[in-house]
Amino acid sequence: MKSGDDWSYWRVLRTGRLAPLLVGVVISSVGDGMLVTALPLLALAVRGDTPAALVIAIVEAAPYLLATALAFAIGLGRLRVPPRALLIWDCLLRGVLFVGLGVLALSGDLSLPVLVCGLLFGSVFRMVAISSRRLVMTALVEPAGLFAVNGLLSTSQGITLYAAGPVLGGVLSAVGQPGVALLVDGLSFFLLLVVLLVVVPAQSGSVRGTSIPASGLRILRRVPMAARLCVVVFCVNLFYMPVEVALPLLVRGPLGGDGATLGVIWAGFGIGTLIGAIGTNWLRRLPQQRLLVAIIAAQGLVVVLLLLVPTASLATAVFFALGVVYAPFTPVVYTLVQSVLHQDEQQPVLTLWSAVSVLAAPIGLGLAGPLITAVGVHGGLAVSAGLTLVLVPIAGMGLRRDRDRAGDQPVEPVPR
């Protein structure tokens, strides 16, 4: 992909149906962002005698379990599933079940088993919906617009999932109760459903025929760089998960904060990802493998800083820095992978890629709960930072072999 032909964000937004679709995605992402702060607080409210760290880990892992299994089934198989249809099913299921959970929480009838089961089954299509959104949106532009679309998705995620959403979730939890966030999130998916039905063509992002030429695993074997990158992304996500479990306990314990404080800290991360995502457009000429290794190193160092903060305001500053350094990671990775694939290869590979990388979340959360219960909040953060920094030279060596073979040059896109 020649840098001189790259589309700007503004040119992509002028592309017909993409702008209203992005608005729908933004609104639903605000609802998801509210759950970043509301779910841990709701888990603590219904936990009974279960250890706090274990309950937070269980509740936050529940949305990933069945979703990851479905993503693997699609990524490893050859059956064609239209991305638009997957998005519609996700909106319907999450809308109905999350609204139901919100109503139960507001009425005081929500129990921990019901919450876990609702999140488990309501999020079945969550993983495939993530890759389907990317497929549908990138299908609406030419290959030169791939980097800009991926950058816009990360920018909107920075604004909604980690800034506006967590703040709203924290405020609603502080002045009302966390169940309101579940209710609003469910309603936001009905709005996205309307946008999908109105503006997205029926076959947007789909492959031709009824089956995919090869499974995602077989395609990944043809692209060793993509396979090794997948392993690196999995490890980065896995080693980060103790931070997700430790943060609510850090806020309510040593930092002396509440739900609103937690929302502000996540907002700092969101503002950082927003700034980092906007700046990502100027990083496209850098050697991408080296950039990914630098991001991993910076993430480990920032978690070390989190160990040392004595106040919530400094924790917010640390999470702001974490957002800035992490923001370029996703658009760089996905653009690099998409640029070497044919269009009919993208659904199985991106779905399998998402499943493998996000599988780190339930595994990491499941391990983080007992880990933090055993070694404490600061001990869990130290383990997270240490493992991430150990990964840096390993990732550098693994990606260097591709750089030696490819000259560390941007990969030319495969003609569609």
Image (cartoon, rainbow, N blue to C red):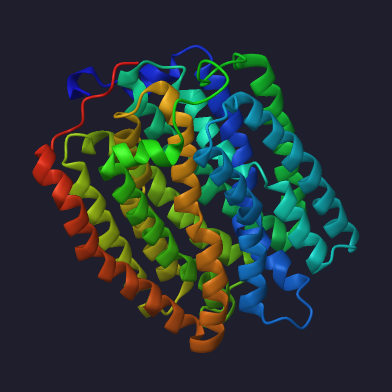
Residue closer to the observer: 143 or 155? 143
Residue 176: in sight, yes or no? no
Instruction: Place residue 405 in its image quadrant.
Output: top left
**Image quarter in which the C terminus is found:** top left
Residue closer to the observer: 407 or 37? 407
Instruction: Place residue 340 in its image quadrant.
Output: top left
Q: Is residue 387 left or right of residue 52?
A: left
- Identify the residue at image location x=59%, y=77%: 252
Give how far across and how far down residue 13 sits, in percent: 44, 20
Give how far across and how far down residue 38 sits, in percent: 67, 59
Give how far across and how far down residue 72 sits, in percent: 54, 46
- Identify the residue at image location x=74%, y=50%: 121
Q: Is residue 297 left or right of residue 385?
A: left
Q: Is residue 113 above or below residue 221?
A: below
Q: Is residue 392 left or right of residue 51?
A: left
Q: Is residue 75 left or right of residue 284?
A: right
